[in-house]
Image: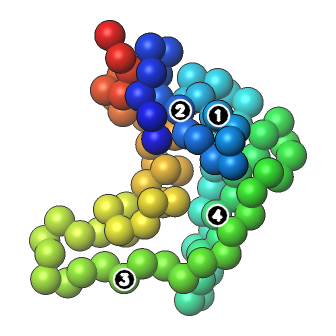
Amino acid sequence: MVSGETGPWLLVNQKEYHFTDSEWKVEVEILKGENVFRLWVRRELVIEETYSPAPVDDLDPWSDEESEDLFVWLTRKRNDEEFIELWTDK
């Protein structure tokens, strides 16, 4: 994640995905015991990664699925206008 003058962008495998560009989307499929992260560009699957979900820390009152799992966090922030404004350089 990088902030920029036109908003935040994600850098993956030397490719930039700008949050203000509606051509890409991300999703996490939560399965039993594993999650699948997918990044799509114009309906073409670019990245698919199966991984074990991060455990939530029961002793940390702030710990939740979003704070422990980068992919879940990314899917929730992808179209979040407040997040995009916060990560836009002025």
- Residue ID for mark 2: 9
Q: CA distance from mark 4 to mark 2?
A: 18 Å
**Discs 1, 2 touching: Cβ within 8 Å:** yes
The numbered dot on residue 37 is 4
Earlier in the chain: of badge 3 and badge 2, it is 2
- Residue ID for mark 3: 55
Q: Residue at x 64, y 34 (%)?
A: 16
Q: Secondary structure at mark 1?
A: strand
- Residue ID for mark 1: 16
Q: CA distance from mark 1 to mark 2?
A: 6 Å
Q: Around disc 4, counting alpha carbons within 10 Å, would you say few (fewer than 14), some (14 to 19), or many (20 or more)?
A: some
Q: Secondary structure at mark 4?
A: strand
Depicted 85 relative to depicted 16: above or below: above
Q: CA distance from mark 1 to mark 3?
A: 29 Å
Residue farthest to the top, as pictured? 90
Earlier in the chain: of badge 1 and badge 2, it is 2
Snapshot quadrant of residue 73: bottom left
Give the number of the mark in front: 3 or 2: 2
